[in-house]
């Protein structure tokens, strides 16, 4: 078990900089998930921790030791790769035990440890098979075994579930989670799948454009996104964003075509803001109700447990998740009721969260 | 696309059959000629029915040209070239594909250029070097005046000489270093996923360990293909062995076939020459048959 400290780490290639000064503290035993769209630098960051990628600036320390100049094998990390990267000519047992063989562990002890790992991962019946004779999920488990057998200080996962089908992915997800509870080793998991990220993480790191946007528990990030990017990236369907201007007694939306009566948000009148609202926080009401916005239904997606209703708000796309038994038809007009408590405000210029509105603030009488 | 019509099937088989006849006919004629006696083989036209002297002719050819030791020489040379080539090619390709060092591209192009300079083109300088491996160094010393200096200072005349004429190393070494093998390996190494290299690094394997434990086992089929091709190629070498083996003890089977070919004024013993040809043809044939399965796999599909 080990803590990881990342200080102002940057990565540049000949032409471009892909990671801009990342700071991150990972506590011993934590399961940290780095989430971000492709090309945001999350894999690069992971590979820098592993030692597969040179660190252009800043420093990474594992357990207090700066590892910038250490070879991967000296860092005490084990990695699970996206395409498993199993050695095709070796049997499962040889694949799992290769690192021990390289380290010169005697054959008897090696066999014993391979057996132990295989038992945990339920790979015992297939130790003699070649990777080509295994299913995707089994290969995944072999890759996990190869990482586990070294008893590393840190586990690194580089999108290890993205090649599995949906059902297997859910299953492996919970297996990884269980394994972490059992080994309690510090783990860093990179993914672009937000459901994977939310379910696995003790702490979630959201990255965008080579920078860390927010660090927090999945709940914190969902409830209090620190930026417009995080707000729209985490959560499905994505959070609705409406551009608006703060007025004395409310919010003028969509270039003034709509108004929302919102209690003073503590922002200067005339400030340009982006108002965000989760689709599941919007309530459908009869069109024309007090304080509701009228919109036209574009499309209804049935999810079984509920449905997603996509509506058109003067040209702006807006989605509503509802479990109610309302069945608005496409083209119908509906009313959208938005509670001020559920609103998020972001600066229109910087995208940063504007945290001035307090839900507990007394609502002035109209 | 697979077409299945009887007419097309017939035509394709006909074409295949014609090709087969074309390829095998000379071989059949050689075998028939090798079974005639002196009179029958010189009949015009030669009878295409096999005669009865096959084994006698084989035996005569074997003893006349002393083929036993010559076949052994050929085998040592061909096997040496094949093995040397496989090792050198794998190492050079490993260096070019997996390491970033200054001058890498330059070295790559140097190797590439050897494609345009086959042995036949550079045979005179190559012969000079093999005749005295140290001659380039001697030349450097002479040109820079160091020979003169050393002679003045110590009174010793520097004259280095280390010849490889009439030796196995002389037969093998100049044939080993060519680009084809390096490129075959390079292409293969480029298809090995980067993740495999990284996994090996995470497992703590150094470069050489990765090469031996991962790359070499994965390139077994490549080795078989390259080894087979190079064995045949080296076995069939004529010019180089002819040049550097002045002594019978190191002559190869292919060059010694010349002894069986009738000279002007000698008896036209073509049946013996044909029998000798058959014998010399046999070892490469065995190698191809034995390696065929690996050979084809190494050249077409990469194992995933």
Image (spheres, coloured by chain):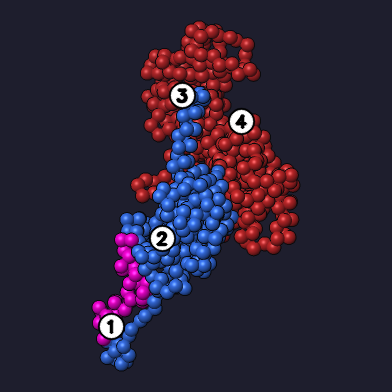
Judging depth in this view, the residue of B14 and A138 nearest the camera is B14
Q: Residue at x 37, y 80 (%)?
A: B161
Q: Which residue is mark 4?
A: A166
Report in which chain the residue with disc 3 lies.
Answer: A
Circle 3/circle 1 CB separation < 8 Å: no
For mark 1, give the secondary structure: helix
Which of the two marks, 4 or 2, is nearer to us in this view?
A: 2
Which of the two marks, 3 or 1, is nearer to us in this view?
A: 1
Q: Position of residue B119 (x, y in %)?
A: 35, 61
Q: Which residue is mark 2?
A: B268
For mark 2, give the secondary structure: loop
For mark 1, does the 10 Å Cα neighbourhood hold few (<14), some (14 to 19), or many (20 or more) residues? some
User: Are labels 3 and 2 assigned to the same chain?
Assistant: no
Q: Position of residue B36 (x, y in %)?
A: 50, 54
Which of the two marks, 4 or 1, is nearer to us in this view?
A: 1
Gap between marks 3 and 1, in whole Å?
Answer: 83 Å
In the rendering, what colour is chain B?
blue
Q: Position of residue B11 (x, y in %)?
A: 46, 29
Task: Specify the segment rendered in magenta.
Answer: B120-148
């Amino acid at each position: 078990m080990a803590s990881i400290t990342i200080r102002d780490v940057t990565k540049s290639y000949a032409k471009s900089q892909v990671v801009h000064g990342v700071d991150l503290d990972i506590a011993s035993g934590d399961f940290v998930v780095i989430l971000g769209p492709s090309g945001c630098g999350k894999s690069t960051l992971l590979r820098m921790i592993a030692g597969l990628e040179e660190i252009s600036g800043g420093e990474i320390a594992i357990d207090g030791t700066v590892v910038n100049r250490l070879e991967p094998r000296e860092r005490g990390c084990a990695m699970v790769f996206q395409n498993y990267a199993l050695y095709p000519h070796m049997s499962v047992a040889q694949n799992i035990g290769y690192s021990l063989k390289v380290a010169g562990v005697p054959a008897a002890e090696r066999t014993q440890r391979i057996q132990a790992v295989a038992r945990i991962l339920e790979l015992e019946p297939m130790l003699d098979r070649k990777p080509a004779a295994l299913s995707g999920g089994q290969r995944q488990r072999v890759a996990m075994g190869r990482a586990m057998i070294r008893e590393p200080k840190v586990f690194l996962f580089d999108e290890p579930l993205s090649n599995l089908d949906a059902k297997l992915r859910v299953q492996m997800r919970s297996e990884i989670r269980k394994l972490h509870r059992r080994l309690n080793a510090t783990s860093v998991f990179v993914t672009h799948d937000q459901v994977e990220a939310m379910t696995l993480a003790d702490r979630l790191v959201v990255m965008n454009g080579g920078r860390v946007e927010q660090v927090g528990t999945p709940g914190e990030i969902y409830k209090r996104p620190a930026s417009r990017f995080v707000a729209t990236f985490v959560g499905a369907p994505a959070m609705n964003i409406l551009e608006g201007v703060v007025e004395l007694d409310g919010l003028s939306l969509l270039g003034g075509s709509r108004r929302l009566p919102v209690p003073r948000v503590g922002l200067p009148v005339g400030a340009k803001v982006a108002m965000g609202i989760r689709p599941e926080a919007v309530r459908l009401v009869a069109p024309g109700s007090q304080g509701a916005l009228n919109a036209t239904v574009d499309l209804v997606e049935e999810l079984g447990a509920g449905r997603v209703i996509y509506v058109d708000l003067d040209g702006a796309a807006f989605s509503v998740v509802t479990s109610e038994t309302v069945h608005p038809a496409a083209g119908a007009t509906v009313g959208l009721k938005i509670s001020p408590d559920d609103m998020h405000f972001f600066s229109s210029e910087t995208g940063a969260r504007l945290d001035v509105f307090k839900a507990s603030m007394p609502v002035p009488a109209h | 696309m697979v077409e299945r019509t009887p007419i097309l099937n017939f035509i394709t088989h006909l074409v295949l059959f014609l090709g087969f006849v074309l390829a095998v006919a000379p071989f059949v004629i050689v075998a028939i000629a090798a079974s005639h006696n002196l009179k029958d083989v010189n009949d015009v036209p030669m009878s295409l029915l096999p005669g009865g002297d096959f084994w006698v002719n084989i035996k005569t050819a074997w003893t006349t040209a002393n083929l036993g030791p010559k076949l052994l020489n050929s085998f040592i040379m061909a096997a040496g070239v094949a093995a040397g080539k496989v090792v050198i090619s794998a190492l050079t390709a490993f260096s070019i594909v997996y390491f970033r060092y200054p001058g890498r591209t330059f070295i790559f192009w140097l190797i590439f250029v050897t494609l345009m300079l086959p042995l036949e083109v550079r045979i005179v300088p190559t012969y000079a070097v093999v005749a005295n491996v140290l001659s380039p160094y001697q030349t450097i010393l002479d040109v820079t005046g160091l020979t003169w200096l050393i002679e003045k200072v110590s009174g010793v005349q520097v004259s280095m000489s280390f010849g490889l004429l009439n030796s196995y190393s002389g037969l093998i070494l100049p044939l080993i270093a060519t680009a084809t093998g390096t490129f075959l390996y390079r292409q293969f190494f480029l298809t090995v996923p980067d993740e495999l290299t990284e996994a090996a690094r995470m497992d703590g394997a150094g470069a050489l360990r990765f090469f031996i434990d991962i790359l070499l086992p994965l390139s077994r089929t490549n080795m078989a293909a390259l080894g087979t091709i190079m064995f045949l190629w080296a076995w069939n070498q004529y010019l180089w062995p002819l040049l550097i083996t002045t002594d019978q003890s190191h002559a190869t089977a292919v060059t010694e076939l010349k002894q069986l070919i009738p000279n002007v004024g000698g008896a036209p013993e073509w049946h013996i020459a044909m029998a000798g040809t058959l014998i010399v043809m046999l070892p490469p044939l065995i190698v191809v048959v034995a390696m065929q399965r690996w050979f084809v796999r190494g050249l077409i599909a990469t194992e995933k």
